[in-house]
Image: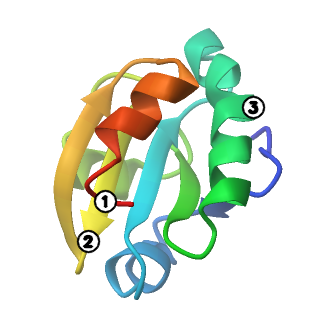
Amino acid sequence: MTRTAGVAEVTDADFTAEVIESDLPVLVEFTADWCPPCRQMAPVLGALAAETSDRLKVVQLDVDANPATTNAYKVLSMPTFMVFRGGEPVRAMVGARPRRRLLEELSDVL
């Protein structure tokens, strides 16, 4: 999987520890190597992770390598972005989007 600078990768094995038990809200990008819109989002997520590291944790999960988590949250399209707060998914967004729109959609989380 292609790593995005500043964005941690999570797996089925560490999803609970990294996302569900996080003290910060977490933005999870459900992604795949074969997904062009996912690659398009890489610089946006990298910048977001750098700008909001004290308020928001940004992680990626490869849907092909981590089917249990992908299926548990009924993710069907890539990229899907889910915001988790207090261990619960509080928002889901599907599809690539410009940085400005993503920030607007995350404004109540940040």
Point 63% across, 47% down: residue: 48
Would you say the residues marked 2 and 1 are in contact, meaning their CB atoms lie under 8 Å apart?
yes
Q: What percent of the width, then of the height, locates residue 62?
A: 56, 44
Would you say the residues marked 1 and 3 are in contact, meaning their CB atoms lie under 8 Å apart?
no
Can residue 37 be seen by looking at this rendering?
Answer: yes
Q: Is residue 65 left or right of residue 75?
A: right
Q: Is residue 60 left or right of residue 12?
A: right
- Disc assigned to residue 25: none
Q: Nearer the viewer, residue 44 or 32?
A: 44
Q: Is residue 9 above or below residue 40?
A: below
Question: Which residue is labeled 2 in the image?
Answer: 85
Point 59% across, 23% down: residue: 38
Q: What percent of the width, then of the height, locates residue 105?
A: 31, 37
Q: What percent of the width, then of the height, locates residue 77?
A: 34, 22
Question: Which residue is labeled 1 in the image?
Answer: 109
- Disc assigned to residue 43: 3
Amino acid marked by disc 3: Pro
Considering the image in quadrants, where does the C terminus appear?
A: bottom left
**Total number of numbered discs in the rendering:** 3
Point 49% across, 66% down: residue: 56
Would you say the residues marked 2 and 3 are in contact, meaning their CB atoms lie under 8 Å apart?
no
For disc 1, the neighbor class at 10 Å (few under 14, some 14 to 19, many from 20) is: some
Q: Nearer the viewer, residue 100 or 35?
A: 100
Amino acid marked by disc 1: Val
Q: Is residue 95 above or below residue 105?
A: above
Q: Nearer the viewer, residue 66 or 40?
A: 40
Mark 2 or 1 closer to N-term?
Answer: 2
Q: Is residue 86 left or right of residue 50?
A: left
Question: How much space separates mark 2 and mark 3, taking CA atoms?
Answer: 24 Å
